[in-house]
Image: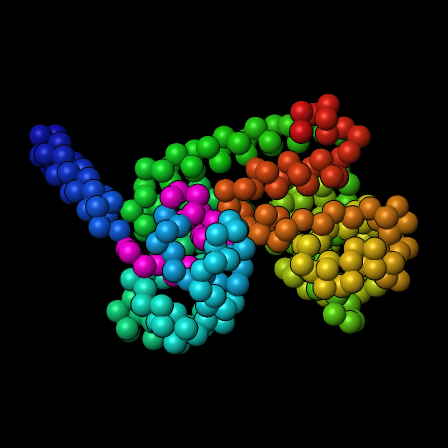
Amino acid sequence: MTRRRSLILAAIVGTVAGLAAAFAEADPPARVVIAGGDLTEIAFAIGAGERVVGVDATSTWPPEAETRADIGYFRQLSAEGVLSLAPDMLLAAPDAGPAIALERIAAAGVEIRTAPDLPGAEGIAPKIRFVGEALGRAAPAGALAERVDADLAAVRAKVARLGSRPRVLFLLLLRGGAPVVGGAGTEAEAIIRLAGGENAGAAVEGYRPMTREAILAAQPDAILMMASRADAAGGIAEVLARPDIALTPAGRAGRAVVMPGMLLLGFGPRTPEAVSRLARALHPETAAAAGL
């Protein structure tokens, strides 16, 4: 292909892409249902919240999201519940389901857009841009993605100045038996590392039960929990008094951090805030000197 033909083809492709983007911006979906708290947060942050008519149970931020119709847990969707809201589009987390419900929703003529499966901090900007493109808000989404990337880079630079690396154990569930902890490869591990800690649950993979012996051997310096789960366990003081926690350094020092679940693990626009907040809690002696 000659250089002239290449330039012409590139111009045509660019024009088509530009027209497609302009069309998407001009004719966005009017009624949107979202299955994924991080996606809901992004939709509201880029100014598309008025078009959101239904959200899943993890969509707890911003407060306006909780005024929308509840479609249940994003992994246990009901096709009837979603379709009853007459949506034009369903924005879904990568692990939303079950598949049969999604098939029925699509068969009814609802467009389903599934977010990119990019966990952790590296996936935040792509998720923001995905939501912006799907909802015809590409420009504000791009600006938000750039701002979040910049804020996160600034926080990481401050965390790098911290000296210690406390061992942190994330407790997910405490319903009898061995507690379920955040092990290797989890969102909990990712946020702990971003905040300048080490994952004391890394001996297990994923979110798995951890025996009392393993917890004692892990020697966590701090316990980390979502606020809703700490409340369900009777409060963080009750958690620290458990026999499998009380004998650890965290239990003896009464050291625990409790944060809202979506802020802590959502990996959305507020993640820089979450990292800063957790880093300050884990490094109270040096956080101020590091600029946190």
Residue occupying the point 54% across, 59% down:
58
Residue 108 higher or lower than 154, as above or below = below
Residue 205: % across, % down: 66, 59
In the picture provided, is 139 more to the left or to the right than 157? left
In the picture provided, is 246 more to the left or to the right than 97? right
Give the total of numbered labels: 0
- Using the rendered image of the protein, determine whether residue 227 is visible from the camera's viewpoint: yes
Residue occupying the point 57% across, 37% down:
272
Residue 230: image quadrant is bottom right
Residue 202: % across, % down: 71, 53
Residue 220: % across, % down: 81, 49
Nearest the viewer among 22 and 64 is 64
Q: Which residues are magenta?
A: 29-47
Tell whether position 36 is magenta: yes
Residue 276: % across, % down: 64, 36
Residue 197 higher or lower than 35, as above or below = above
In the picture provided, is 253 more to the left or to the right than 261? right
Residue occupying the point 48% across, 55% down:
65
- Using the rendered image of the protein, determine whether residue 119 is visible from the camera's viewpoint: no
Residue occupying the point 87% across, 58% down:
241
Split into 4 quadrants, where in the image is the C terminus?
Answer: top right
